[in-house]
Image: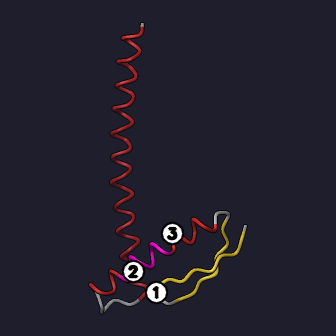
Amino acid sequence: MQSVEVEIFGRRFRLRSDEPEKTMLVAERINQQIKELSTQFDNLDFTKLLLLISLQQQEQILVLDDRNSELSTELDRLNQMISKIIS
């Protein structure tokens, strides 16, 4: 693990990561999101902005999980059709 220093909304955090470049990229994206949200919700503090980002990202994960399940089902269906054609 390597030590990585990132900055989010003017605050520095020292993290340990097996993939420092990816960690820095994630932190940059979070920093961008929090800056965008802070312009929309100027009355929210750092913690509430992070919570809002977490909720938005969790919603995106749920949508992607549903889509992944749909695609997996479709792939299984297509594989069965291909198996029938080949047999």
Image vertical order of residue 80 relative to residue 60, above or below: above
Cα distance in 3D space between marks 1 and 3: 13 Å
> Range of the magenta residues?
28-35
- The stretch drawn in magenta includes residue 39: no
Number of numbered markers:
3
**Image-based side of 12 in relation to 31, left or right:** right
Quadrant where the image shows the C terminus: top left
Pick whichever, 10 or 45, lies toward us: 10
Q: Which percent across, then down, holds residue 53?
A: 38, 74
Q: Which mark is residue 34?
A: 2
Q: Which percent across, then down, holds residue 54?
A: 41, 71
Q: Check disc 3: other Cα within 10 Å, few if <14, some if 14-19, many if 20+.
A: few
Determine which residue is flagged by label 1. 9
Q: Pointers 1 and 3 in contact (CB under 8 A)? A: no
Image vertical order of residue 63 relative to residue 73, above or below: below
Determine which residue is flagged by label 3. 26
Cα distance in 3D space between marks 1 and 2: 7 Å
Q: Residue at x 38, y 83 (%)?
A: 35
